[in-house]
Amino acid sequence: MKKFNIRKVLDGLTAASSSAPAQPGTSRENDAVQETLQSEHFQLCKTVRHGFPHQPSSMAFDPVQKILAIGTQTGALRLFGRAGVECYCQHESGAAVIQLQFLVNEGALVSALADDSIHLWNLRQKIPAILHSLKFNRERITYCHLPFQSKWLYIGSERGNIHIVNVESFTLSGYVIMWNKAIELSTKTHPGPVVHISDNPMDEGKLLIGFECGVVVLWDLKCKKADYRYNYDEAIHSVAWHHEGKQFVCSHSDGTLTMWNVRVPAKPDKIITPHGKQPKDGKKPEPCKPILKVEYKTTRAGDPFMVLSGGLSYDTVGRRACLTVMHGKSTAVLEMDYPIVDFLTLCETPYPNDFQEPYAVVVLLEKDLVVIDLGQIGYPIFESPYPLSIHESPVTCCEYFADCPAELIPALYSVGSRQKRQGYSKKEWPVSGGNWGQGAQSYPEIIITGHADGSIKFWDASALMLQVLYKLKTAKVFERARGKEEKPSTDIVDEDPFAIQTLFWCPESRMLCVAGVSAHVIIYRFSKQEVTTEVIQLLEVRMQSDFNDVDSPDPGGEQTPTLPTSAASCSPQETEPPNQLPAGSNSSEGPRDNLPCLQVRSSPLKQSQGYQVELVIQLVWVSGEPPQQITSLAVNSSYSLVVFGNSNGLAVVDYLQKALLLNMAISELYSPSDPCLRQPRSPRKPRQPSGGLGDSNDGSNNSEDRCKSPTSGSTSPYNSDDDRKQNFIEKAKMSRKISSPTEQKPELDIKDNAFSRSRSSSVTSIDRESREAISSFYFCESFPRKSDILVTPCLLLGTTQGSVMMLALSLPPDGDQRQPVSFSSCGTLVRLKGGILTMALLDANGALLPSSFDPWFELNASDEDKEKGRRRRPASPLSSQEGQYSQFAVLCSEKQAKVVAMPSQTCVYKHNITETSFVLRADVVQMAGAYCIACFCANGHIMTLSLPSLRPLLDVNYLPLTDMRIARTFCFSNLGQALYLTSPTEIQRITYSQETCDNLQEMLSELFTPVETPEAPNRGFFKGLFGGGAQSLDREDLFGETTAGKASRSLAQHIPGPGSMEGMKGAASGVVGDLARARIALDERGQKLGELEERTAAMMASAESFSKHAHDMMLKYKDKKWYQL
């Protein structure tokens, strides 16, 4: 989790140019609000990643620490422990992880990548780091094996050679097993890559090597020769030992298993075809699909387990992937929902030379993780505590709510707990390592995801964890087509007609409103009581464009005029029975008219506790033209109103009275003298493509490719790089805003004036100008007109062309529901560059004025409580306290932000956010007790602006837009939190809060916990006496530099990692580093002792020489007189 250095902006330096007051002479207003947010409050960093690892490729398990590691094809590494303990790491190269090996109970992990590099990860720190790397230059890595409690890693290569690496120093040994030495000298062909390496459980000096061609070699490490060679005609995929070391089993490409006796290499002891049909005439069974992996695990009290993947008969066409568990005479075939990537059998002991006692199988699928209980009849699966079901259906929209009401999570959990499946294993989840972080974040957080199948999921995201709370299926409201032939011709999407397009949730009132791609809106209330709805309340709305459709087919009849703006003349749309088509709806001769896209179910709907349908609103076909998709949505529980808009206009519905109050075209919102009014032009409306939610903008209808980058696999009609970039930017705009059907082909607009930007066009559009659509709503209490001195309920609305308009709401007196709410248009408030993204209202002190709401009440309570809850609250008649600057309207578009004083409607602050790019998401958020605007731009910049002065506080180039998914799902929340979908299966959470970044180490979970390694199995008296137990091997003596010599320097390059001793400058970095330092210290001490010993020996030799010479001298002159000397 990399922290980003922030390019902090000194307060006040840039305000003079980019955030200066929009008009001269407004210094009094500028100084009125004391702002507390400074750039020191902001810093950007990643926090945690949730969800299933995208495109998994390998897996490993530490049986002592109980930690599971999963590697992916993009070089990512995900580590899982107990519920809430998970970690994300990334290899810089991005190459696929082909194999993982734990240093069991040592807090370290070895990863082998497809770019022929191996890496040593230190897991003893909260954010794992690479200690060492080794990059092979001349060999392709195919298999790795690290024996239990060994520091020597065996690496098999594509050439058939085996190299040995010291994992402490990450240096190559000079000991190499060459392929031509391992196989028979008479063999004329190369044996192929090494597909398996393992040492004999009972003799560490014997290494079993499997070659792809079908040859298996038992290599004697001490004698450096092959003891036995086992030949079979079919290619080998995997090998597994019996724990006694006398037998092993191989899986082959023809669906067979061969059992071999170690001392009988001539032929297999037994050949098994688990899924082959046995012919009656005794002939060889028909070949089956390859058995990709087999594991052989023994039990003390019964028959051994043999677990394998693949091997099905070729006549099982279309059958799902299976895992086969063979135990004694029984064979269980367990079907999986997705193809199997890898599996591991979890055993009670980490020692390979003891009875294994398997208790579970971890199965890694392409899009799921399944753990099977081997100890119960029927092999039930464990209930996963991880949030791995984010992608159960592709995510189409996402919202994030931090610091929401505390009672929400318990309420959602209580109704969601009843939705859990039954039949899970009764045992606890076996991956139980690690400890939770001691985080300071105590506020509740909720994430809501909308999906392509119409489902909505509520997630508890508190304390950097993620747990599903409740799931709502909106598709239950509609009738489902049983086959393609029954598919209604009124559909405007070819696939996923129930997909969630946008949603609005009020945490205080618990009102939920969702809009789908089939131009439908559903309003939900929260209830703790079950109800059965006999007839679903339906309201059909006819939103007709005011454009002159010169290219449209002649409807052959009189068109219905748009409803006038006056509420008195806005008669509610008559509700049609759901099982009855409207009159004059469709005929073989005429165009479709008054037809909804989906059929609301006619049978009673049993609604369990949780969110229950209050009203369904459907837009209908108009004179052969399909309804335009909904681009914006808002709900207000105080007024019982829901408002939604698209490229045709907006509609306001009273969901209590089930009545349509307002249906206006966009042009009617402008006053006739409004300078922002545009003359409408209408291109032909093409049929909506599949999905319509950004993922399908690349033209792919395949659910597998629904979340791919739009630039992958597609040819661009543009020649230059700038054109391609602009094309991608336009697509990103559509993905973020969920554009109307007329915006399907992005085109380049060379005009660049104050109110022009690149626009999309339809296939037949001549002027290449997109239609204006509603992009944002905001209920508030403000001053609709400059002359007002009292605040009244209002509705702010923004358009894709940058106009911000206001509607004044006139509520009935004393909450009388018999009179409808009336509306009056107040014209354009202000104009901005680019489409409006967010709007908010601040008081005179700069505090946010939230939309009014009624607190939640039980819908199915007594009549008295119900009436009390339903009574409308009249607007509070607050007057302007500080002259004409008593409120500030905050408006943010794709290009700029403005702050407008109310009721004078003068722009007091303006800031141009970007000139060359555009803003994808903007939100007004609370931060350190104050408010600011948080923006995410398509060029990857994340920015924050103070309020109300719009001073730049943060600007970080974080994430360049490379995928529509990011554009569609990025969202900010309060207290410095944000998230986005980094892959189709994973949510990445980030923070832009300095305080959270400072406390991140404490908040993150710990992967490594001190655990005693289990005792080695007892050899027994007789085995110890007669030498029948496991034979150990001094690998240091065999592979060390003294005996084996140095390896070739050109074979591999050692790269110190950022977490190695060199990088950490002696900091404590886990047991591997400690062992390496201890080894170096011991070597230095031994070297000094050796030097001392050599000096002592030299002194002794010198003394002996002196003594000898002295003795010789004494003998020479012993008998001589003094005068003879």
Image (spheres, rainbow, N blue to C red):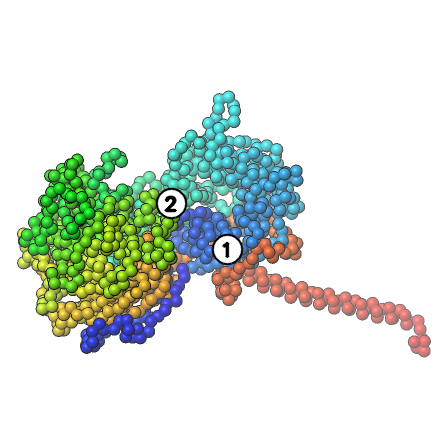
Q: Which mark is residue 367?
A: 2
Q: CA distance from mark 1 to mark 2?
A: 26 Å
Query: What element does badge 2 sit on?
Result: loop
- The residue located at (34%, 43%) in the rendering is 702
Q: Nearer the viewer, residue 765 or 52?
A: 765
How many neighbours does mark 2 have within 10 angstroms: few (below 14), some (14-19), or many (20 or more)? many
Q: Quadrant of residue 929?
A: bottom left
Q: Position of residue 147 (x, y in %)?
A: 54, 48
Kindly identify which residue carries mark 1. Answer: 119
In which quadrant will I find the C terminus?
bottom right
Q: Quick one: SS at disc 1?
A: strand
Residue 333, image x and y in percent? 41, 34
**Crowd rating for badge 1 (residues with CA inside 10 Å; few <14, some 14–19, many 20+):** many
* Name of the residue lying farthest toward the top: 281
Q: How many marks?
A: 2
Kind of residue indicated by mark 2: Lys
Residue at x 45% of width, y 37% of height: 310
Quadrant in the picture for residue 1052:
bottom right
Q: Which x, y percent locates residue 173?
A: 61, 54
Residue shown at the point (32%, 52%) measured from the top left: 965
